[in-house]
């Protein structure tokens, strides 16, 4: 027997699963919409229950109605909490992703199939829509801007850089995705897929974090 | 227990048996009878988020003593036979089968009603099980470098059985103990290298 709050619970179960995942699963547009609809239905019911009383409702005299109102109110509050917690779990995850340097493009690509990052044009991605809602995409963009502005205060330290002290100044890398040409102290390098380079670690750290390059050895 | 805490929200979805104390015409759907009156005395399993407030809000009876909308009982997970089994041997009870959020459900229930004996039993249960959890976590974390694959090393079938029966809180404890041991070991090895 479905009852009020069941859909919200489903949403929270999604959030629970999200917590243990590396990537961000697709946004539950339908479910979110249904929960919001449920809240509106409940609100309408409350309004129609209260209508005959004209602002003179006495809970002690109308116990049964008061009880119904309380149940409806609690259901709405429950749904609100579920909705907020679901979105909060996702934004937490998004912030984490922004800090770790994944860019929005990657996030959109993830939805086709986590782990299949190199089959961007595979047959499975006919519906290559993002796993983020439009609002979340906006959030990521603005949060990224904020982070960039914050980092701008310190030019000599990279806040999102690796905390591991480098063992070697130069490393071998393999190119996983075409990344175009980059400029280094030692001239330009053209990063085409499957090629290998011996480069200065500091020059390519971000590209490694973004998944364009793979560190070897 | 924050407002946004997922586990706390899931705990609130656990159902507890309630008995309605008055007729409510509009709430028949709670007892599978939409459109019918929910009669006083009807027994319905309500999620905690709903039952809690219905139980502590007084209906404001004008005449006699104030009564609440519903009376509630302890949920099946805290049945007497479960508690007795915990008293006898805490390690032998798979708490997860009772409820995935066993402890937080129990603490919630104890907020609602005084259960001094239950509280003592649960405290003893946790202490005894926590020691066992720590033991398993150390065994796995200290074993083969790769954490989760180590589960078939050193731990017998009984251990796995026990670990499967952990509730959500205990699982977190296990994971922390496990990760801690592992990180400590990695750190020690790194020190040796330099």
Image: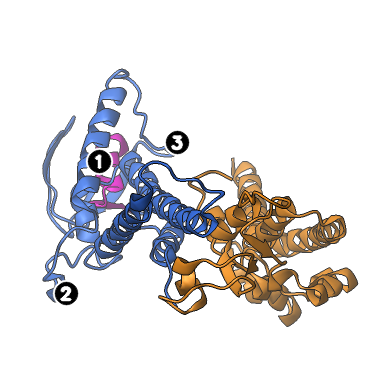
List x then y, in percent, for residue A81: 44, 50
Residue identified by numbered label 2: A124
Q: How is the image coloured?
A: by chain
Q: Are the residues under badges 1 and 3 in a single subunit?
A: yes
- State the mark number for residue A92: none
| Residue A209 colored in magenta in the image | yes
Mark 2 crowd level (few <14, some 14–19, many ≥20, 10 Å Cα): few
Q: Which residue is mark 1?
A: A139
Which residue in the structure is indicated by mark 3?
A163
What kind of element bears circle 2? helix
In the displayed structure image, the side of residue A19 where residue A90 appears, left or right: left
Q: Residues within 10 Å of mark 3 (few under 14, many from 20)?
A: few
Q: Nearer the viewer, residue B81 or A190?
A: B81
Which chain contains the residue that carries disc 3? A
- Give the letter of the chain under mark 1: A
Question: What's drawn in magenta, residue-wise?
Answer: A198-215
The hue of chain B in the figure is: orange
Image quarter for residue A139? top left
Residue B67 on the magenta segment = no
């Amino acid at each position: 027997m479905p009852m009020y709050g069941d859909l919200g619970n489903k949403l929270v179960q999604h959030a629970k699963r999200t917590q243990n995942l590396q990537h961000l699963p697709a946004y539950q547009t339908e479910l979110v919409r249904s929960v919001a609809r449920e809240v509106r239905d409940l609100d309408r019911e409350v309004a129609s229950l209260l209508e005959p009383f004209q602002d003179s409702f006495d809970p002690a005299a109308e116990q049964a109605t008061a009880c119904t109102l309380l149940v409806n109110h609690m259901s709405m509050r429950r749904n609100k909490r579920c909705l907020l917690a679901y979105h909060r779990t996702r934004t937490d995850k998004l912030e984490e992703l922004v800090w770790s340097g994944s860019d929005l493009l990657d996030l959109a690509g993830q939805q086709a199939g986590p782990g299949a990052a190199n089959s961007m044009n595979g047959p499975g991605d006919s519906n290559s829509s993002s796993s983020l809602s439009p609002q979340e995409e906006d959030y990521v963009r603005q949060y990224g801007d904020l982070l960039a502005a914050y980092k701008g205060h310190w030019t000599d330290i990279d806040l999102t850089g690796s905390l591991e002290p480098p063992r070697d100044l130069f490393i071998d890398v393999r190119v996983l995705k075409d990344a175009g040409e980059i400029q280094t102290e030692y001239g330009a390098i053209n990063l085409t897929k499957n090629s290998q380079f011996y480069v200065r670690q500091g020059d390519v750290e971000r590209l490694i974090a973004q998944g364009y390059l793979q560190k070897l050895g | 227990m924050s407002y946004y805490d997922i586990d706390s929200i899931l705990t609130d979805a656990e159902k507890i048996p309630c008995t309605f104390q008055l007729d409510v015409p509009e709430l028949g759907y709670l007892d599978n009878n939409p459109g019918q009156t929910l009669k006083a005395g009807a027994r319905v399993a309500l999620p905690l988020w709903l039952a809690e407030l219905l139980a502590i809000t007084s209906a404001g009876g004008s005449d006699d003593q104030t009564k609440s909308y519903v009376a509630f009982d302890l949920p099946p997970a805290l049945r007497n036979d479960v508690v007795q089994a915990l008293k006898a041997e805490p390690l032998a009870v798979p708490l997860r089968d009772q409820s995935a959020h066993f402890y937080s459900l129990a603490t919630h229930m104890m907020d609602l009603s005084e259960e001094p004996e239950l509280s003592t039993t649960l405290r003893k249960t946790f202490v005894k099980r926590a020691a066992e959890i720590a033991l398993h976590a150390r065994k796995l974390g200290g074993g083969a470098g790769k954490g989760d694959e180590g589960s078939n090393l050193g731990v017998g079938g009984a251990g796995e059985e026990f670990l499967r029966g952990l509730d959500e809180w205990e699982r977190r404890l296990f994971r922390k103990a496990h990760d801690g041991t592992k990180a400590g070991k990695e750190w020690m090895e790194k020190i040796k290298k330099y």
